[in-house]
Image (spheres, rainbow, N blue to C red):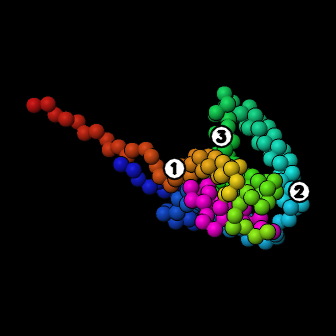
Amino acid sequence: MLRLCPTEVGPGRPGWLTAGAVRLGVLSLFVVLVGMVRPRLTHYSAGLLVLVSFGLVVVGAALFLGSTRRLARRLHLHGVTEPLLAQIRRTGLPLLGLLFFLFWTMVYVGLWWFHPHTSFTGLDPHPRFADFFYYAVSTAFISPPGDILAHSRGARSATMIEMLTAFALLTTYLSSFVDWGRGTAPAEPVEDT
């Protein structure tokens, strides 16, 4: 039997508000804030944004791996999986979800930069950053938007790969709402007659 898990409740927080719901609320706030970014992209600004983002990804990955190694030494964790999972739990799902969406947004901006007229249909000649973010978030939940369509083979392939990788993110979020353990009642002794 599955049961909702009210996980640890802090002081002043109602018992029905789970930690998973709080995480989802924080991620939703991040999505709204990034979705409000208004500037339009030109071919030049898109290329610059892609190059800067690539540099940030390299620096962020190095910091993440270095921090994971320090955490593994501090907590005496062994192997690759244990320290990595501990670091992911420590980072938090809202930040990881936002980074996932931003990564795929930059992939789509890069595809548009490479082929601005053929990669997507439904975009303005100078689309907003938020248009690509909208496409990335919608695609992550296995529902690409109907108003922006991947047109080139590269854009279609990236869309399918994002849907495949997003499935893991989605199942992680869903599992944070439910306690998958079974509630067991203590066994009653059976009398033998």
Earlier in the chain: of badge 2 and badge 1, it is 2
- Residue 19 appears in the figure: no
Residues in magenta? 126-149
- Kindly identify the residue that appears in the image at 66 percent across and 65 percent down: 148
Mark 3, residue position: 86
The image shows residue 121, relative to residue 187, as above or below, that is below
- Kindly identify the residue that appears in the image at 28 percent across and 39 percent down: 187
- Kindly identify the residue that appears in the image at 16 percent across and 34 percent down: 191
The image shows residue 47, relative to residue 81, as above or below, that is below
In this picture, residue 111 sits left or right of residue 159: right
Earlier in the chain: of badge 3 and badge 1, it is 3
Q: Nearer the viewer, mark 2 or mark 1?
A: 2
Residue, far left: 193
Cα gap from disc 3 to disc 1, whole angstroms: 17 Å
In this picture, residue 138 sits left or right of residue 5: right
Q: Amino acid at mark 3?
A: Ala
Mark 2, residue position: 48
Q: Nearer the viewer, mark 3 or mark 2?
A: 2
Q: In the image, residue 35 lies at what x, y percent?
A: 71, 67
Q: Amino acid at mark 2?
A: Leu
In this picture, residue 137 sits left or right of residue 180: right
Q: In the image, residue 84 lies at what x, y percent?
A: 67, 37
Q: Within the image, what quadrant is residue 88 found in?
A: top right
Q: Within the image, what quadrant is residue 140 found in?
A: bottom right
- Kindly identify the residue that appears in the image at 73 percent across and 57 percent down: 119
Mark 1, residue position: 175
Earlier in the chain: of badge 3 and badge 2, it is 2
